[in-house]
Amino acid sequence: MSDGQVVATQVRTVTLSIAELEADPHSVFRRYRAITPFIAREGGGYIVLRAPAVEQLIKDPRVRQPETEFPEIRGITEGVLFEFFKYSMLTSNDPVHRLRRAPFTRSFAARLIADLRPRIRKIAEELVAGWYEEGEIDLVDRFAAQIPAQAISELLGLPKEDIPRFTALVYSVSRVLSFTFAPDDLPDMQSAARELRDYVACLIDSRHATPMDDFISAYVADADSKGELSPIEIIVQIVVLIIGGTDTTRVAMATQVALLLQHREQWDAVCRDPALIPGAVSEALRYEPSVGAVSRFTLQDIELDGQILPSEQFVSLSTMSAMRDDRAYERPDVFDIRRAERRRAHLVFGGGPHRCLGEALALIELEEGLAALTTRIPRLRLAGEPPRLRGHVGIRRIGGMRVRWPS
Ligand code: HEM
């Protein structure tokens, strides 16, 4: 070996059980990030911990998106839930991924930003007005869950009376992404998935018959004009959009309020100065992200800081760990809504070709939701223990969160 040449060695990789990882993921990640670029998970797979490697691998051709392997591991090999994975943009690779995503990039982002912000603010204000007199509520159910469900309903132009049923279906199906279901739950989830698929199929048919001035009509017209997607692919992309946009934002909304209420001076500052809202949203997503990692599959051996991440393995690129890495952030374990190093492309939304399609919508929901609460209820308080966010990969989980205020 010549001077300065780095040779990768296979150091014995630390393997952790799910229980160890779930108990206190931030501490576990902090401890191991200092000594190793990745750890192994009992039962298979690796977790990449350091910011530079996570940022690199998220868009690296040496890894690919897992396809139907994820449901297969969980025992889902047929039925509508399986179709959701088989035909989705999230679980496909190029060239198929590009075809499935393209109609959205053409019909989605710009329109949302222009139209939805005032409507989402109105939704948030109406929710607050609906329960303000009660003086105490569960913020997760009565606010954080309602905003994404109603925002998606607005986006798709759903009739108001459909929203409760539609929301229940979405929450039942979205559990497939969050590791929280048992084999016994599968029949109910499959049946909810079937109902959701049929609901979306009807919606698409109705827009075919009578196009309206809404996102879904634009999407259907675009997909039809290109003729590159099958009818089931068109339906599944809408379903994935709906599922991707509910739990993620529900958990993020509750978490940002909980964090601010635990750092009272920062909550009060946001109440006084709404210009701090984007920084508060961004910092909450960094400090306690609602999505813990993105999944990839290695196509070859990859050297990371002198160690080899082996080929043909599932890897979780831990955005959660990376966003607490002092290689990328100063004082990473401090919650500070005024921190200087806010990045233009927030890592919580991933990166590369699969970067979150709903990022703009999520930020609008989180910002307008926070604006409504800080304007209407500046004296909001936690009414019990702060909620604990659980989970270290996928969509993280939150329990209830009671809040109160003097009415
Ligand atoms: C705080 C809220 C959100 C977070 C943290 C989040 C996070 C993510 C991440 C990390 C990915 C990339 C996954 C990967 O690379 O494997 C992703 C993809 C995606 N997200 Fe989000 N998301 C959020 C909200 C939303 C919303 C509101 C929508 C839609 C309305 C949405 C729709 C999607 C879709 C369709 C994809 C798949 C994109 C593709 O595969 O090309 N997300 N999201």
Image (spheres, rainbow, N blue to C red):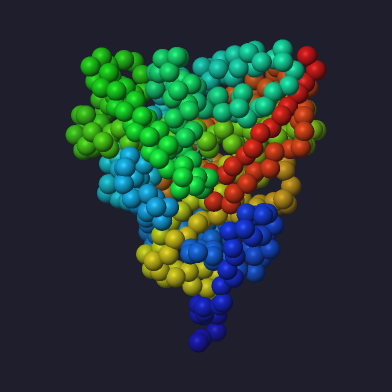
Rendered residue at 36%/19% (across/down) = 214
Q: Is residue 290 above or below residue 39?
A: above
Locate residue 194 relative to residue 249 in the image: left or right. left
Quick check: can you spot residue 37? no
Locate residue 7 relative to residue 277 in the image: left or right. left
Number of marks drawn: 0
Residue 113's x, y, as percent?
47, 25
Q: Residue furthest bottom?
A: 1
Residue 199's x, y, as percent?
34, 25
Q: Is residue 208 above or below residue 248?
A: above
Locate residue 135 relative to residue 209 in the image: left or right. right
Q: Is residue 210 above or below residue 100?
A: above
Q: Is residue 37 above or below residue 124?
A: below
Question: Quarter of the image holding residue 196?
Answer: top left
Q: Residue furthest front?
A: 184
Rendered residue at 59%/54% (across/down) = 322
In the picture, the quarter occupied by the C terminus is top right
Depth check: give the residue in front, 365 or 152: 152
Rendered residue at 39%/66% (across/down) = 312
Rendered residue at 41%/60% (across/down) = 297
Quick check: can you spot residue 143? yes
Locate residue 132 relative to residue 169 in the image: left or right. right
Depth check: give the residue in front, 318 or 179: 179
Question: Quarter of the image holding residue 11?
Answer: bottom right
Residue 179's x, y, as percent?
51, 48
Depth check: give the residue in front, 272 or 229: 229
Residue 14's x, y, as percent?
59, 70
